[in-house]
Amino acid sequence: MTMTTTRTVEYLADGLTMTGHLAVPAGVGRRPGVLLGPEGMGLSDVERGRADALAELGYVALAFDLHGGRYLGDPEEMLARCLPLLAAPDRMRDIGHAALAVLRAEPRTDPDRIAAVGYGTGGAVALELGRDGVDLRAIGTVNALTTGRPGEAARIGCPVWAGVGSEDPIMPPAQREAFTAEMQAAGVDWRLVVYGGALHAFHHPPVDHPTVPGVGHHPRHAQRAWRDVVDLLAECLPLTQ
């Protein structure tokens, strides 16, 4: 039985040497590609495992880096890096475009059939790629209902799926409403799933370091959100065509 292959890839973005995780499915021929963005803490084995799972399904997946190969387990350090980043759409786009170039350069990737899926800060990066007019087949985000600069959401040319916990204090109802209003005004094909009782980063297994308030794992909804992401990809990036 042939297995998926994985490798570490280094590339430059945001003035840093990024270290991504590329997972390639077994077999030959070009496959759809998926960019996978991590929570604000940065790339971890959680996202690497999700990239591997996508490769098992048949996608070329790149779990991209946010912090130059570092995982920011200290909440203060994470916020000190992520809050300015989230306020700088062009920096987020730089991070996204650099990762996209790596994914497209992989010979097994079909460069015309790529989706971007992200969690938290990584989801904000995925949305900014859409607002920048990148040709994506789908955008999926969890915990990332970030709004963009006025009018730029009209450049999003693919379906957008977003998931959020009903009790997420970082993405509260007012933020949900602002995000969906932006998507609706732009004519985007959008969906929002609110997972009842879930906090911020509900999809992420518990971590052994401090987190910001309002974060908590919800095992059942974590599984549902993953299934929803896989369904989005099956709809917009079918593996047979």
Image (cartoon, rainbow, N blue to C red):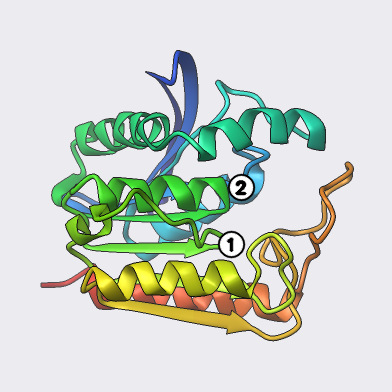
Q: Is residue 117 above or below residue 7?
A: below
Residue 159 or 170: which is nearer the viewer?
Answer: 170
Residue 217 x %, y %? 78, 66
Q: Measuring from the top left, give residue 47's x and y in whole percent.
A: 57, 48
Quote the CA–CA distance across marks 1 and 2.
9 Å
Local secondary structure at mark 1:
loop
Q: Is residue 226 visible?
A: no
Pick the front one: 142 or 53: 142
Secondary element type, mark 2: loop
Q: Residues within 10 Å of mark 1 (few under 14, many from 20)?
A: many
| Outermost residue toward the bottom in this view | 196
Do residues under tags 1 and 2 come within 8 Å of each other at their CB atoms? yes
Residue at 71% across, 68% down: 168
Residue at 50% across / 62% down in the picture? 145
Q: Is residue 142 left or right of residue 221?
A: left
Residue 28 versus residue 174 in the image, above or below: above
Residue 77 disc label: none
Earlier-in-chain disc, 1 versus 2 = 2
Q: Is residue 160 above or below residue 102?
A: below
Quadrant location, the C terminus: bottom left
Q: Which residue was labeled with disc 1? A: 143
Q: Quadrant of the N terminus?
A: bottom left
Residue 175 point in image, percent of width and height: 56, 66
Amino acid type assigned to the residue bearing label 2 in the image:
Glu
Res. 53 in view: yes
- Judging depth in this view, the residue of 14 and 2 nearest the camera is 14
The label on residue 39 is 2
